[in-house]
Amino acid sequence: MHKKIIALLSSLTLGVCCLSGCSPDKQATQEKKLDKITIAEVTHSVFYAPQYAAITKGFFEDEGIKVDLIDTQGADKTMAALISGEADIGLMGPEASIYVYNQGSDDYAINFAQLTKRDGSFLVSREKNDNFSYKDLEGKEVLGGRAGGVPLMTLEYLLKNEGLTIGENTASGEVNVRTDVQFGVMAGAFAAGEADYTTAFEPTATQLVKEGAGYIVSSVGKDAGEIPFTAYSATKSYMDENSDLIQRFTNALYKGQQWVQKASDEEIAEAMQPFFEDTSKEDLIIVAQKYKEIDAWSSDPLLKEESMNRLMDVMIKGGELKEKIPYDSVVNTSYAEKAIKNTK
């Protein structure tokens, strides 16, 4: 009798698990159906909201993909992770693929989907200035970022277009754009008294304001114009061997981009929250509002030739590129075009 009761209870328990979907075997089977893709992010940033929305809203799962994110802290490290096979896809500025292409590598990175279309940094001043003009930077120091990086090149491109002279002689009115402070500690250095201005992405810019350390006076991205600031790339060999997977990835991304365009600031904040637990929902709402205001996020993954040419103009003006390379040597638009055409 005792054995019969145990057998009956075991049978009932198994039945309940099957009905409730809690079967370990069933869960394992479902997980096996998802293809894992490792994305190396140049930095873990709220600037990439459409990507995080695509994850939390289930768009990648709908395409049979499980996303694993690694934060590499730098385009050079992101590209190294991509080339070595540590990551399948790299999220970084397309300038990195141009550098690798020019090195003559056989298996270089190809950009297949654009995520952001403007610089996402804001100019933060130590002094409040409701009538800011870039002429106010004459004779001042600005923490600009890493030499060779798109944030620095975009800032310098903007300043030159504003008729300013970049140099170290602030006494003569030159703007000293400093590159000696690492990106990750720029805000802390500024708060500690370094320089007159700094560039900062969100939510760092807002945090500096809330802490009374500075005032946001302009948007570098809005004032500099559109460039392909951040894009997804994969090596030629990986794309050749995983074409269908790249397509499904791009489909999911496009759904995330379209969702963000229509979603409210609060909805975007909620979609990002699981990836930024240390940032309040209030701050994430502010971030979403600011990036929407400057039209920072691409509404689709298509990286256009005109946009890429402008990036190369910025690089040439910044002294990081001698001449333009063929657009289609480092860009493949077929996945984006198909995603736009077929994804509903």
Image (cartoon, rainbow, N blue to C red):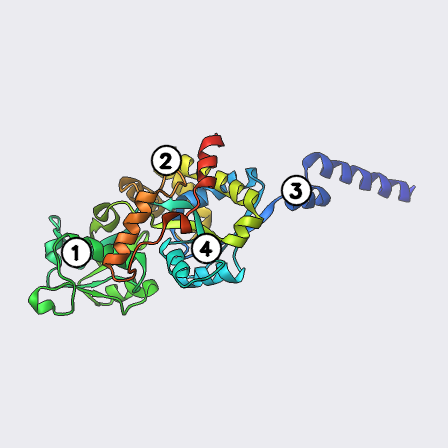
Reading the chain from its start, which is encountered first: label 4 or label 3? 3
Amino acid type, label 1: Lys
Q: Is residue 86 left or right of residue 308?
A: right
Q: Residues within 10 Å of mark 1 (few under 14, many from 20)?
A: some
N-terminal of the pair, mark 3 or mark 2, is 3
First-in-chain label (2 vs 4): 4
Q: Is residue 171 left or right of residue 141?
A: left
Residue at disc 3, secondary structure:
helix
Q: Which labelled disc corresponds to residue 109? A: 4
The image quadrant of residue 321 is bottom left
State the separation of the CA atoms marked 1 and 3.
55 Å
Q: Report how far apart the C-alphas of labels 4 and 3 lie in the structure.
A: 32 Å
Q: How far apart, in angstroms, are the residues tagged by discs 1 and 2?
A: 32 Å
Q: Nearer the viewer, residue 267 or 342?
A: 342
Q: Which residue is mark 2?
A: 261
Decide which of tag 1 and tag 3 comes sooner along the chain: 3
Q: Earlier in the sequence, mark 1 or mark 2?
A: 1
Identify which amino acid the numbered label 3 is placed on.
Answer: Gln
Crowd class of label 4 (few under 14; some 14 to 19; many from 20; radius 10 Å): many
Q: Position of residue 327 (x, y in %)?
A: 37, 48
* Residue linked to disc 3: 30
Task: Please name the residue that numbered disc 1 is placed on.
Answer: 160
Q: Position of residue 86 (x, y in %)?
A: 53, 60
Note whether 59 is above or below 174 in the view shown.
above
Residue lying furthest left in this view? 172
Give the residue furthest to the right: 1
> Could you say whether the residue bearing mark 2 is in a helix, strand or loop?
helix
Q: Position of residue 33 (x, y in %)?
A: 64, 43
Query: Looking at the image, do the residues carrying marks 4 and 3 touch, with CB atoms under 8 Å apart?
Result: no
Q: Earlier in the sequence, mark 1 or mark 4?
A: 4
**Quarter of the figure that contains the N terminus:** top right
- Name the front one of labels 1 and 3: 1
